[in-house]
């Protein structure tokens, strides 16, 4: 760098990058089609990003990706649907919900205790098929304007709520490809390792595509493949309970798990 050259300032904050990325998101061809489109149930999940508590931002666009976290939850290992898996807050649409954003915010409040008024909805994303439970899921992208305390409402449904640093998810060493077998067919998809907890399937695909569209992805070894052994619709041997030091969540029985 010469004496006349200076580092370029960070002109695009993470919130703006997230909002701009929505135009490029399309799940088509990334997930299997629903087995029964006519009988598919409507659901929504909240993809909520906020500034890490220890890194305050002066303006909404001051944060860059490394300063953010995303809200995830770990389901109880005793649940019949997607036991022990990591997912976004969310669930099935109710007749009283005005739209998908209302569903996602209501479910997130019921499950994690967050204050819906603290969430700015950036976009309602295209529907994504959730094959295992025949749901048509609408991801709702949110920005946490004033993060509030989150905790499990019902421990029988959810083990913990996680505010996972985005930098941890973007770390190439935390990424690999899962291989899930259905009879003679094998499906491959992105996955993330969070201190021994694996984010895979539906949730991992949404994060992977969003990170790509936002320009945040750091190259990682897609050839690192690890097989997910399944019992029914979920992996065998869900992770053991962990100290609930990051808050927790609950699921009201209509939730949507992460598996495609």
Image (cartoon, helix red, strand yellow):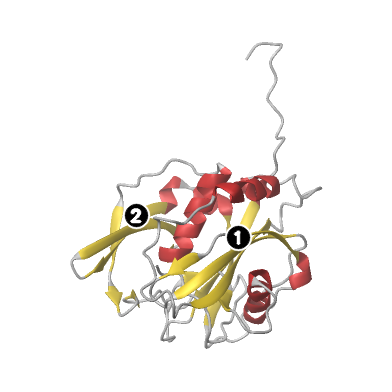
Point out the image quarter for the C terminus: bottom left
Q: Which residue is mark 1?
A: 70
**Residues at circles 2 and 1 in contact by the CB criterion of under 8 Å:** no
Please rate how many residues cluster around mark 1, counting C-alpha atoms within 10 Å: few if below 14, some from 14 to 19, many from 20.
Answer: many
In the picture provided, is 205 more to the left or to the right than 254?
Answer: left
Q: Position of residue 198 (x, y in %)?
A: 42, 64
Image point 53% across, 49% down: which residue? 211
Please rate how many residues cluster around mark 2, counting C-alpha atoms within 10 Å: few if below 14, some from 14 to 19, many from 20.
Answer: many
Q: Which residue is mark 2?
A: 177
Point out the image quarter for the N terminus: top right
- Reply above or below: 184 against 177: below
Specify the quadrant of the image occupied by residue 81. Answer: bottom left
Is disc 2 placed on a helix, strand or loop?
A: strand
In the picture provided, is 60 more to the left or to the right than 128?
Answer: right
Q: Looking at the image, is mark 2 or mark 1 earlier in the sequence? A: 1
Image point 75% across, 44% down: which residue? 62
């Amino acid at each position: 760098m010469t004496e006349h050259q200076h580092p370029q300032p960070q002109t695009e904050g993470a919130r703006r990058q997230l909002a701009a990325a929505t135009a490029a998101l399309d799940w088509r061809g990334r997930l299997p089609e629903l087995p029964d489109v006519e009988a598919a149930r409507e659901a929504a999940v909240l993809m909520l990003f906020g500034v890490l508590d220890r890194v305050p931002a002066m303006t909404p666009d001051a944060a860059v990706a490394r300063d953010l976290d995303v809200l995830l939850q770990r389901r109880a290992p005793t649940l019949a649907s997607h036991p022990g898996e990591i997912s976004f807050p969310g669930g099935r649409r109710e007749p009283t919900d005005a739209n998908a954003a209302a569903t996602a915010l209501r479910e997130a409040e019921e499950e994690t205790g967050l204050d819906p008024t603290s969430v700015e909805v950036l976009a309602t994303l295209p529907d994504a098929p959730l094959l295992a439970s025949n749901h048509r899921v609408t991801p709702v992208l949110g920005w946490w304007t004033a993060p509030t305390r989150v905790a499990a409402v019902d421990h029988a449904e959810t083990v913990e709520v996680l505010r996972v640093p985005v930098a941890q998810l973007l770390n190439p060493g935390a990424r690999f490809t899962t291989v899930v077998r259905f009879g003679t067919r094998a499906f491959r998809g992105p996955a993330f390792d969070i201190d021994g907890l694996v984010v895979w399937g539906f949730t991992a695909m949404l994060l992977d595509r969003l990170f790509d569209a936002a320009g945040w992805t750091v190259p990682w070894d897609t050839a690192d493949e690890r097989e997910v052994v399944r019992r029914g619709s979920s992996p065998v041997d869900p992770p053991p309970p962990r100290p609930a030091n990051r808050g927790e969540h609950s699921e009201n029985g209509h939730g949507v798990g992460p598996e495609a």
